[in-house]
Amino acid sequence: MTMEIEKEQHVLVIFPHPDDEAFGVSGTIATHTKRGTPVTYACLTLGEMGRNLGNPPFATRESLPDIRKAELQKAAEALGIKDLRMMGLRDKTLEFEDDGKMADLVSDLLAELKPSLVISFYPGFSVHPDHEATARAVVRAFRRLPETERPKLHLVAFANNTDADLGQPDIVYDISNVFEKKMDAMRAHISQTIWLLKEMEKLLAQNDEATVQRVKFERFWTYRWDDDKVSELKA
Amino acid sequence: MEPIITAKVQESIDHFANKDIYIHMETTNGAYASHFNEKFFSAGAYIRNARLSYEHGKIVGEGPYRVGLKLEIGWVYAEGLTHYGFDEKGRLLLAGHDFDGKLAVALQIGEEPFK
Ligand SMILES: [Zn+2]
């Protein structure tokens, strides 16, 4: 059951790693930019701790950030994102940052951009500690706004227990129209995606149903404020 | 980076001995290990820009290699190292890449802090 992507005023995408946008939501982003809707992508880190450095290595621990930064810029360009913000935090450290400052970072973006839609990760269902810390910061920043002033909050969930504990996504978009742009975004992050893409392109060429479903449909869960499990910020 | 040549690495380890140096060290099996295999026990450690000084250090093994640095009252140690290189500031970069080309361990030494 798919639905139409609604027209937005401004879309704010918040993820911690370059390539977080590529697999799950790049078709949705491309649909918005194609319509001329402004999209801001706030990417919190440069994925400095990425493990794919190759053997033989194509990068070092120290050269990887610049490589991933260039890939992120290329992906943003492929998706028509004109406002890419690299927020300068460090990969794998977000859960150790001051939680209040993390929420402030999101609050500042909300105040400045007044987005009608925010896309991020679903807290409790996004696996990587940086994803979870980002998701919590988004929810805490939203809580500071009166309910009537909150943008829509569409979240990505992919933990193994998602189906069992969160249920089916309430939003499913068919992004076939912008399929090539999505592939371009994934290809832009080639240092991290090369093996995955090789496998994926092979399966797509064979019309493997599960892979087609995974790439052509993007799934979101609207945040359930009635079941808000993110802890309060300590004063 | 190149496959480790122990003589080159040893020379560099000797060069940094008894100086105030900065260390980057990490071990990792990736933040997704337990997601893909719930039986997998994920562990790792990371220290960046720890400032210290060592009396002497050694690279040993037949490859993958091990490096130990003897401090005045302690040790720094890493195993599984496969590749080495130097950055533009002459810092020694040692890394262990697994069979899939994923970083498993890193040990880096420099006289200037890492970025
Ligand atoms: Zn990520």
Image (cartoon, helix red, strand yellow):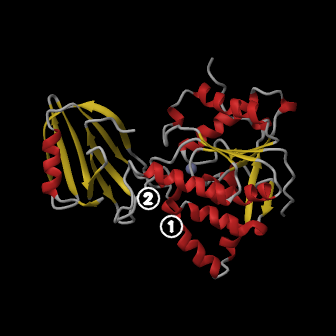
Judge whether residue A19 can be spotted in this image.
no
Residue A224 in sight: yes
- Residue A102: image location, x then y, percent: 61, 31
In this picture, residue B31 sits left or right of residue B54 = right
Extreme-bottom residue of the structure: A206
**For this rendering, which residue is in front, A162 or A175?**
A175
Residue sitting nearer the eye, A197 or A222: A197
**Residues under numbered marks 2 and 1 in contact, where contact means CB atoms less than 8 Å apart:** yes
Q: Pointer 2: what residue?
A: A52
Q: Chain of mark 1?
A: A
Q: Badge 1: how crowded within 10 Å, few (<14), some, or many (20+)?
A: some
Left or right: A204 in relation to B69: right
Label 1 element class: helix
Vertical side of B113 occupied by A170: above or below: below
Compared across the picture, whether A49 is left or right of A71 comes to left
Residue A112 locus on image (x, y percent): 74, 32
Q: Looking at this view, is A180 or A144 the one in front?
A: A180
- Which residue type carries mark 2? Asn
Q: Residue at x 54, y 56 (%)?
A: A71
Element on which disc 2 rests: loop
Q: Quadrant of the N terminus of chain A?
A: bottom right
Q: Residues within 10 Å of mark 2 (few under 14, many from 20)?
A: many
Instruction: Give the percent coordinates (x, y) of residue B110.
Output: 26, 40
Q: What distance separates the C-alpha of mark 2 from that of mark 1?
A: 9 Å
**Label 2 CB, ligand 1: below 8 Å?**
no
Say which mark, if any, is on residue A194: 1
